[in-house]
Image (cartoon, rainbow, N blue to C red):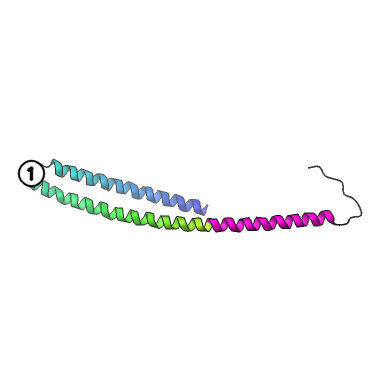
Amino acid sequence: QWYQRRVRRGINAEYGERRTLTALRLDLDAAKHRVRAAKTADEMKELETFVDEAQKKFDELYEICREVLEERDQANAEMVVHLEELCEVQVEYFKAATELAQEMCSTVLNRPTKVKAPVRKR
């Protein structure tokens, strides 16, 4: 459950960042379109400041998203290592438990008894 919560939290955060990044990219595209549609050099120059601001915001969030994804990749790799270790430990535990159960079964079946117990149907 802990692993599922962590993954869900990461997906939700990634979705929010991605949505914001998409909105900023659309703002940047719209600003560039307005510059291309400008009729005068003064209007174009004024709109280019909006493009520069939009590009700066987009680049900042892009860098943040890239860092978040790299951190998430690292965390996922660490979780996979822990899951592998858990699997190995569980396999060893169940091997030992099986050996103990077989030993107990043979001890019980081979013990001397005066009265034979009725055979149970399975």
Residue found 89% across the figure and 50% down from its top:
116
Crowding near the residue tagged with mark 1, few <14, some 14–19, many ≥20 C-alpha atoms within 10 Å: few
The residue labelled by disc 1 is: 40
List x then y, in percent, for residue 42.
Answer: 8, 47
Residue found 84% across the figure and 55% down from its top:
110
Name, please, the residue furthest toward the right: 114
Total marks in image: 1
- Magenta includes 98? yes
List x then y, in percent, for residue 52.
Answer: 19, 52
- Magenta includes 100? yes
List x then y, in percent, for residue 77.
Answer: 46, 56
Residue found 18% across the figure and 49% down from its top:
51
Please give the range of residues in magenta. Answer: 83-110
Specify the amino acid type for callout 1: Thr
Q: Tell me if 70 is positioned left or right of 58 in this view.
A: right
- SS majority, magenta: helix
Q: Tell me if 118 is positioned left or right of 6 in this view.
A: right
Res. 35 image quadrant: top left
Q: Tell me if 41 is positioned left or right of 34 in this view.
A: left
Residue found 14% across the figure and 48% down from its top:
47
List x then y, in percent, for residue 106.
Answer: 79, 55
The local secondary structure at tag 1 comes to loop
